[in-house]
Structures are given as C-alpha cells and as structure tokens.
Image (tube, rainbow, N blue to C red):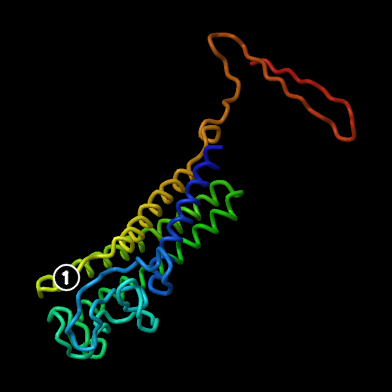
Amino acid sequence: MARAITSLLGLTLLGLSIVFAFFIILSGVTDHTPLNKTYFLEADTSGIHGAKDLTRWTYLRFCGDGNHDCTKSRPAPAFGKAWDANANAPSQLVGSHGGDTTSSYYFYMWRFGWVFFLIALFFSVLAFFTGLFLSCCGRIGAFLSATSAFLAMVFWTLAAVFMTVVFVKARNHFRDDGRDAHLGPYAFGWAWGGWAATFIATVLFCLGTRKSKKDRYPPHPPRRTGGVETMTVRRRRWPFGGRRTVDKEYA
C-alpha cells in the first residue's frame, strides 16, 4: 500500500514537471495565458540595429511586448539573433557566432541549456510512462522509474543552471549599458519548479525500490526455546483428493 502511494505521488509530480517543460518550450507560440507571460529575459533594445524596441527571449522565438510580434520559430536560436550583425548591443553579448551577432560564451551556453531542456523532457516522459505501466512489477518498475527520473533530474539541473547563468548575466549587461532589463518570473518558475518536482519524484521512486518489511524479516523456522521442545506440523495434500496426513516431529 505504501509503495502504491509513493508511486502515485511520484507520477503526479513527474506529470507536473512535464507540463512545466511544455510551458517553457511553447512560450511565444500563442498569446494565451500562461504562454504569453513566459519568457526568459525582457530588455529594452530600442536603438539597437535590427532589434525591436523591447525584446523578449523565449525558447524558440524573439518576441515583443506580451509575446506579440515574434520572429519565426527555429531550434536553438543564437542569443544575438534578436538584432543585426555587428549591432550596437552590449559588447559582451556580441561576437563572431550566429552570423556576427553573438559572443562565443552566450552562443554555446544557451545552446547547451536549450538541449538540456529537451533531454530532461525526454527522460521525464520516459520515467512517467515507465512508472505508469510497470507499477504492477513492484520493485522492478520502481527501479526503472527511479533511474529514468534521476537522469531527468540531472538534465533538469543542468538546463536550469545554464538558463539562470546566461540570462542573469545578460540582464546585468543590459543594465550596465543603461537599459532596463528583467528576468521572466514565469519561465524561471516553470524551470525551477519542474526541477523540484522531478527531484521529489526521484526520491519517492527510490523509496519504492526498498524491500518491504515482510521481505526484510522473513519468518524464522521453529527452534528450541527455554528448554521447551517445539513441534512442527506439516500438512501434506495428496493429489486427486487422496489421503491427507499430519506428520509430527519433535525436536
């Protein structure tokens, strides 16, 4: 019973982390809540060549205020694709990568973070369906779910850390350049909330791999105690409704 409860809680939390991951990935795709409020960074980019007056960095697009007026969706867009090549953006953000729009640091750091989100989502889905369909297998199902959930947690950690480092530093560079910039509370909430849900689910699945009390403490065979002889009674059932006998053995 306890194993079933921990598995159910683990599956619920994994399902929650999967929903959070889709909120992050689909940000900017529609103008409905909460996707229209999900972005990693919002900065004043007015006066930067080729950039909007206000730019929001989402998972697949660069959008304007309210996640409107977005660019076309593309996988792993370079951080500096929000403006033209060699634009007058903060110098720490501009470099030779992404068509002379992005520095090497922001080009690779955000692309790694982008990929880690996808890998985390893959293992989260794998752990969810493993736990859902193999729960009848007892400890084996819990072990497979725990392994997948642990891998999901590892990549959630990497994705959230890379995301946080990249966009906190970028916000600071915009502010140092005299521009208003702030982080997206929804995107960071989904990212770290998904990490927390995956972490707790992993712990719960690991608890499900433990042996039950009955398995850890099997019944002991009869033995002599205090000088009193114990009796073992064995019932033997013969096939085809035959005779049944009772054997008594005295220690």
Compared to residue 147, the image places residue 240 above or below, namely: above
Residue at the disc numbered 1: 180
Count of numbered circles on the image: 1
Between 41 and 149, the one nearer to me in the picture: 41
Quadrant assignment for the C terminus: top right
Callout 1, which amino acid?
A: Asp
Q: Residue furthest top?
A: 227
Q: Residue at x 54, y 51 (%)?
A: 140
Compared to residue 97, the image places residue 42 above or below, namely: above
The quadrant in which residue 36 appears is bottom left
Q: Residue at x 41, y 61 (%)?
A: 20
Horizontal side, residue 75 vs residue 250: left or right: left
Compared to residue 217, the image places residue 223 above or below, namely: above
Q: Position of residue 102 (x, y in %)?
A: 21, 83
Q: Residue at x 46, y 66 (%)?
A: 122
Quadrant assignment for the N terminus: top right
**Is label 1 in a helix, a strand or a loop?**
loop
The quadrant in which residue 232 appears is top right
Horizontal side, residue 6 vs residue 156: left or right: right
Between 21 and 223, the one nearer to me in the picture: 21
How packed mark 1 is, by other alpha carbons closer than 10 Å (few <14, some 14-19, many 20 or more), is some
Q: Residue at x 22, y 86 (%)?
A: 101
Between 246 and 15, the one nearer to me in the picture: 15
Horizontal side, residue 237 vs residue 141: left or right: right
Q: Position of residue 126 (x, y in %)?
A: 50, 62
Q: Position of residue 174 (x, y in %)?
A: 15, 73
Between 192 and 133, the one nearer to me in the picture: 192
Q: Position of residue 3 (x, y in %)?
A: 53, 41
